[in-house]
Amino acid sequence: MKADPHGVLTGTHFIDGDHACCEGALAAGARFAAGYPITPSTEVVERFAARVPTVGGTFIQMEDELAASITLQGAVWGGAKAFTVTSGPGFSLMMEHIGYAAMTETPCVFVDVQRGGPSTGLPTLPAQADMMQARWGSHGDYEIIALCPNSPQECFDLTIKAFNLAEEFRVPVMFMMDEVVGHMTEKVVIPPADQIEVVPRKHTRKSVEDYLPYGSNGDMVPEMAHAGEGYKFHVTGLTHDERGYPNMTPQTQDKLVRRLQNKIRAAVDRICLFEEDGIDSADVVVVSYGITSRVAQRAVQMARERGLKVGKLRLITAWPFPDQKIAEIASKVKALVVPELNLGQMVREVERAAQGKAKTIALPHAGGGVHNPDQILNAIVEAIRC
Amino acid sequence: MAKGRVSIVVERCKACGFCVEFCPTHVLALSSAFNSKGYHPPHVVHPEKCSGCDLCGMYCPDFAIYGTKVAEPKLVKAAGGEK
Amino acid sequence: MLNIDDTVNPVEPFLRSDRMPHIWCPGCGIGTTVNSFARALIDSKIDLESLALVSGIGCTGRVAGYVKLDSFHTTHGRAIPFATGLKLANPKLNVVVYSGDGDLSAIGGNHLIHAARRNIDLKVICVNNLIYAMTGGQTAPTTPGHATTSTNPYGTFEPAFNLPHLVEAAGAVYVARWTTFHVRQLARSISEAFQKKGFSFIEVISPCPTLYQRRNKMGDGLDTMKYYKEKSKVKHGTPTSEVGLTLNGEIAVGKFVDRDRPDYQSMMRAQYVESLGERYIEEPEVECVCG
Ligand SMILES: Cc1ncc(C[n+]2csc(CCOP(=O)(O)OP(=O)(O)O)c2C)c(N)n1
Ligand code: SF4
Ligand code: SF4
Ligand code: SF4
Ligand SMILES: [Mg+2]
């Protein structure tokens, strides 16, 4: 399905990542946002608040993030595509509802413009330290998808992708920006609506009698109905059977929780996006994501200028983690260098997936700025030498 | 002659006694019989007094009892059926 | 004595019969409130297909799972914000929030007052059993002074919320209180709330014999119903500041507030029309995002 032209601001713009994210959401068909102000994410909803009445939709500023993160889910069940936007402390408050969205299979997008933490931390400065929280922050076993843009253009493009994945898999998608990407202003090209592919809701065509709200289909993603259509369905965060009815047996739990996991894991190849460069001939590969990938790019260039064989892997999808891809690369190279704006999060995934086939070198940064390319360069040189 | 009729879904009853207490015409009493969950459901002791007001149904927290008005022609048959 | 005939219980069409019997204890008042709710649906001829019911978590929160409606059992305290999203995304829906006193006024208290302030068009039915029942009888913000609970084993000493007063102050357009003894009056109030546009709040005082009455030596459900009958006073229009509850005292019931104030969506539309004129697009262009 093509994008609704009303939401698409076709043209070439000079805007920051937060604004581009908002335009991506509108282009993807989001017509509802609930938010609560927090730096450095607020510009996304400020723009949405200004734009949405002329597009046809609703923005509501809620009393807190606990509310925002469930209000958007009510809107989804009312038929809208919906999202919320936050940063560190607000993201922490939203955790229970990420689990609720995963459990009830509510397609929606959570945008987290990462800032330094813990706690109030660095409100105006970047970090990438919510990566594990995005994956594991709610209790219980579940899967989510997380994307990491590294430019305002990607804030636009990948926000559309985030909504599309949310709809395709009926899963909450975490859109993991960071303060630099959010506040960096660059050229953003918004194509005409007929060049934007939008995934529609997986709405059931079954009759009221035949409809099973949580019946697993071949692809493990159940069909959805909206309130007010006559299906009289039930949605609960309790463990439930195919009818959506609570059923607290280990058997039902096993069946449900495994399906929630498998529907994502079975599609890892399709969900996992990455950008790679020079890996085949590399001795060392730098694995990075988000803003850090731009610093890494510079370091890789510098290393190549010195004649070093360095490859680059940029994770666009952080979750599910591309285990297979990392394993393949690890079997070909000496080392994987992993710079990130935290004290060691995704590097553990890289190390796990590399299965000891290559050395994994962490390059932590506590946040508040980005790496100096020299730091990454030094790590590359060191890795090649040993 | 009874204007109403009361129906009891014995297996749903948890013997709270609300219906017995609040039936305006005292049609009901808790019986000494047990249902399969071990509760004593109500039984009809004065069918002829039932007005079919469904207050018992409004009170019953277990959706286990309800009263219905009996249409005139059905009256004799219904009342007879109670005995 | 089994006496089933060909007629059906008038509440049956509103229930998920395949889920009966329900989990509520003998003499619990929650089921009784559902009868009044069903009666109100019949009386007010609401289109059931356009009706959605949203609950939080608790014994009362289980109502969502037993009614044959589009029904959402959400998270603890968050029924109101979920319902807000549902209503704003599809203004044609009638949205009822059905939840417990703790859910709505403790963990969800912030949402309660803000939804009342915004005057979101929601019908809130609060089953107030004066306790956190589902978790075993802990003190709620509604527990009257001196009552014994599992977390105040020597008696509560915190002052309790007077819910009608709270929601009136926050902006609700319709506020009533009944007990589970007042089945017909409650049904009438729910019907009236369906006629109102805006935030309506109906408190139903209800027995929790298992965890509140028993611990406070107040007998069983039936004893509590008799107490409600004896101690309730219908006081329509009484200032809500005067309807606070005490452990064994009088229970003021009736309709306390019935006023008109533009609801959130009317105010939103008016503002956009004023500011944006022709540029304002009221209805989403994509009515249905289905494939
Ligand atoms: C976030 C969260 N905290 C705590 C709980 C545990 N919990 C479940 S129900 C409940 C209290 C319910 O009390 P109330 O809303 O009065 O409902 P009742 O059971 O009395 O009908 C609590 C604390 C929970 N489910 N979620
Ligand atoms: S009110 Fe219902 S549950 Fe209670 S005794 Fe009567 S039939 Fe049984
Ligand atoms: S229908 Fe009315 S009169 Fe008949 S048993 Fe029920 S409460 Fe009593
Ligand atoms: S614990 Fe109390 S509120 Fe919960 S079902 Fe039992 S009686 Fe009702
Ligand atoms: Mg309670």
Image: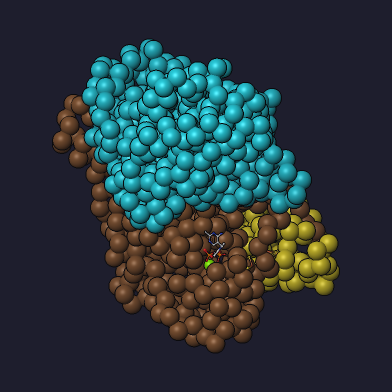
Q: Position of residue B54 (x, y in %)?
A: 61, 59
Q: Residue furthest front?
A: A385
Q: Observer-nearest residue: A169 or A377?
A: A377
Q: Give the left or right position of residue A9, taking residue C249 as reference.
A: left
Where residue A278 appears, x then y in whole percent? 50, 18
According to the rendering, which colour does chain A have? cyan
The answer to which of C181 and C60 lies nearer the viewer is C60
**How many numbered discs, if any?**
0
Q: Quadrant of the N terminus of chain C?
A: bottom right
Q: Residue at x 58, y 51 (%)?
A: A139
The reply, left or right, for residue C140 in relation to residue A238 is left
> Chain letter for brown?
C
The residue under the point 39% across, 20% down is: A305
The residue at the point 45 percent across, 25 percent down is: A161
The residue positioned 50% from the left and 45% from the top of the image is: A344
Dividing the picture into quadrants, the one containing residue A297 is top left
* Left or right side of A237 for C191: left
Relative to A139, say whether A278 is above or below: above
Asked if residue A141 can be seen in this view, the reply is yes
Classify residue C275 by image quadrant: top left
Q: Which quarter of the figure has residue C61?
A: bottom right
Which colour denotes chain B? yellow
Image quarter for ligand 2 equals bottom right
**Which of these two is toward me, B19 or A170?**
A170
Quick check: can you spot residue A82? no
| Color encoding of the figure | by chain
| Residue A373 horizontal side relative to residue A144, left or right | left
In x, y percent, where is residue A295? 37, 31
In the figure, C60 relative to A257: above or below? below
Residue C69 placement (x, y as % from top left): 56, 43
